[in-house]
Image (cartoon, helix red, strand yellow):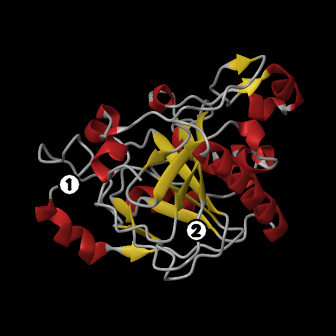
Amino acid sequence: MGAHVFPGISTSELDVDVAADVSALYEDGITARRGAFPVPWVDRLNEDVEAAFEEALARPGGAVGRGPNRYYVEIHPEQIDGFVELVDHPWVRSVCTAVLGPDYRIVELGFDVPLAGAVHQPWHRDFPIPEETRRERRLTSLAFNVTTVDTAPDMGPFEIAPGTQWDDGPDFEHGMFPPRSRYGRYQERAVRRYPQRGDISARTALTIHRGTANESARARPVLVLGVDGPEAANGERHDMAITRGYRDTLPDRVRRHLDCPVVEELTPVTQKHTIEGLVMGDA
């Protein structure tokens, strides 16, 4: 399957052949599975996201700004009906295992919402390059994205500069924001993505990317699933939790990958005011 597959993992241990996806993640920084989910499943997900977004906006700290008219909201697994179908999808399981190993951990569930009037974000990555990645060019975490609406060109599509996950330098502000002097490189490589309901993508959040201006009258919600390998510590930045009763309903192979507290009662997540949110400005 290639040199980048997690050591000790063989094709026979995976539900789906993801060799091409692993290669794409290391070469381009992103891959996708078209039509992974039925459209009715996505429409139910969109209803759950809309409800969670309305609830988050109604309380202090419920949503964090990621630029004008653009929000991020972290939620708990129980807030979406399709959580098990998402994390137990054969392609998701196989990509996680092939890239991060059998002990991968689900550490984040949330969604981004660029509303009408959202502007171009600065080019960025979602966190500084981990030492393992810098030294060994090895990925230690993944982000999966599921659009809850069909993406049109005027809806502020996600834009990514393939192959830039290895870019580094002391001139990156906070290790995440390249200086404007580097923007030409990203503009030359830039690819806009137009996922449709049912599609899912996987990427390394280190690949330089941005949200673009939403010139439509519609919001473009995107579900985010964050997964860590054994060395990664992205879970420290998130507050996902599950109740004991919900945990007992989960299949063993889902339960063992969840890295979050088990509580008697859920508390709505208060968003951490991240460096990314500060640099991009409060919405």
Secondary element at tag 2: loop
* Residue that appears at 27% across and 40% down: 134
The answer to whether residue 15 is seen in the rendering is no
**Spatial distance from mark 2 to mark 1, Cα to Cα?**
28 Å
- Residue picked out by circle 1: 178
Rendering coords of residue 148 (x, y %): 67, 64
Q: Which residue occupies 78% across, 24% down?
A: 243
Check the image and report above or below for 119 versus 73: below
Query: On the image, which quarter does residue 162 sit in?
Result: bottom left
Image check: 21 left or right of 158? right
Vertical position of residue 152 compared to residue 137: above or below: below
Chain-order first, disc 2 or disc 1: 1
* Local crowd size for mark 1, using a 10 Å CA cut-off: few (<14), some (14–19), many (≥20): many
In the image, 33 versus 112, the foreground residue is 112
Residue 70 position within the rendered picture, expressed as x and y whole percent measured from the top left: 46, 58
Q: Determine the residue positioned at 86% across, 23% down.
A: 245
Find residue 157 and report its horizontal and vertical position in percent: 48, 72
The amino acid type of the residue labelled 1 equals Pro
Instruction: From the image, tell me which residue sits under label 2.
Output: 219
